[in-house]
Amino acid sequence: VLNHLQIESLACLIGNSMGGMTALSFLQQFPLFTKSHINVSGSAQALPFSIAIRSLQREAIRLDPQWHNGQYHGVGYPRNGMRIARKLGVVTYRSAMEWDGRFGRVRLDNEFQPTQRFGSEFEVERYLDAHAERFVDQFDPNCYLYLSRAMDWFDFCQTCVRNSEDVVEALSTIQLQKALVLGATTDILFPLHQQQQIAQGLARGGAQTQFLPLDSPQGHDAFL
């Protein structure tokens, strides 16, 4: 696309979360095309915790009878699987501090019914229900599966020309003039030490690099 638009270089490439992974991949595949880079809540490889969470999300979709082995168009839609997958995701995008500050243990106003004891009773549950309902009508289930697996597969060490097992060393192959790397201290999905690795690697590669850990209560979603 950039070649088609006759853009010969980029002043700055910015990537958040999975976009940060994509940006690192671009920088590796097209060296010297970009002068500077801003990486926000990104990572150079997926960690076991993140892979485990995404595995549960995919399983929720695949076990929904309406998924039909991915051939659901015209015959159904795995709505319940998507709702559960989205709820799991949202829980990891935030931090325990934010959940407590926003919702506490506030209960819903409706009168408690013994027969509904396992339904939504707390405000935080209603929030997750509403968030999931909005999401299922806006995102394709198969896209959800492929994009989440793509994050699991991403490992800059394996794509690096040096094929190094050391993340910092692998990232040092990227050549930039300047770099800014940001992350949230409360991020459990892409932990802060992963952004620190990116900053160290880019600095070792010769970039004038600044690393900014943000003391945000909003977890991974802080970049939004």
Image (spheres, rainbow, N blue to C red):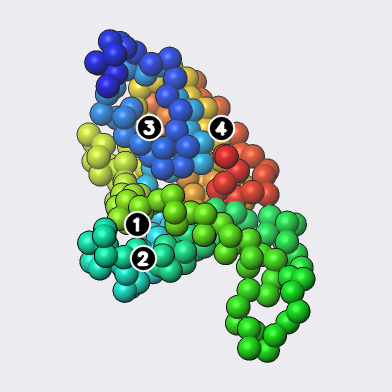
Q: First in sequence: mark 2 or mark 3?
A: 3
Name the residue at 77% across, 71% down. Answer: 109
Q: CA distance from mark 2 to mark 4?
A: 41 Å
Q: What residue is pinned by disc 3?
A: 23
* Above or below, comparing residue 176 to residue 166 in the picture: above
What is the three-letter code of the residue carrying label 4? Phe
What is the three-letter code of the residue carrying label 2? Pro
Front-most of 161 and 155?
155
Q: What residue is pinned by disc 1?
A: 141
Q: Are marks 2 and 4 in contact (CB under 8 Å)?
A: no
Q: What residue is pinned by disc 2?
A: 78
Q: Is residue 92 visible?
A: no
Name the residue at 31% across, 12% down. Answer: 7
Q: First in sequence: mark 2 or mark 1?
A: 2
Q: CA distance from mark 1 to mark 3?
A: 25 Å
Q: Are marks 1 and 3 in contact (CB under 8 Å)?
A: no
Mark 1 Cα-neighbour bin, 10 Å: few <14, some 14–19, many ≥20: many
Work out which quarter of the rendered image holds the N terminus and state it. Answer: top left
Q: First in sequence: mark 3 or mark 4?
A: 3
Per the image, label 2 sits on a secondary structure element best described as loop
